[in-house]
Image (spheres, helix red, strand yellow):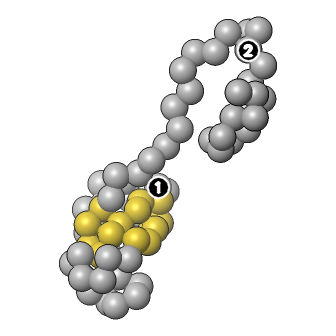
Amino acid sequence: MPIYEYTCQECGKKFEKLVRAMGDQSKPPCPSCASKKTERAMSVFAVSEGQSKSSPCMGCGGGPCPMG
């Protein structure tokens, strides 16, 4: 079950919603103001470019790299 991010068009709040079916296109109401004017937002996710085996990267989870 995927978790989608939504933005309320009325109050501007962002929230996440666990969706039972990937094809479900229904719009959940905003948990802050109960408006049904919500839109699914683009999720940001990390993409790792191919790192060489000699790379010192420790996979620190997306924050600033302490290795430089």
Residue 63 figure quarter = top right
Q: Is residue 29 visible from the viewing direction of this image?
A: no
Tell me residue 5's x, y (percent): 40, 62
Question: From the viewer's perspective, is 9 left or right of 61?
Answer: left
Which residue in the protein does label 1 denote?
Answer: 2
Question: From the viewer's perspective, is 30 left or right of 54?
Answer: left
- Residue for point 53% across, 38% down: 46
Q: Is residue 63 above or below residue 1?
A: above
Tell me residue 11's x, y (percent): 30, 83
Q: Which mark is residue 55?
A: 2
Question: From the viewer's perspective, is 6 left or right of 62?
Answer: left
- Residue for point 40% across, 71% down: 14
Name the outermost residue toward the bottom. 33
Name the outermost residue toward the front. 68
Q: Amino acid at mark 1?
A: Pro
- Residue for point 56% across, 27% down: 48
The CA distance from mark 1 to mark 2 is 32 Å
* Residue at disc 1, secondary structure: loop
Q: Which mark is residue 20?
A: none
Q: Amino acid at mark 2?
A: Ser
Mark 1–mark 2 CB contact (< 8 Å) = no
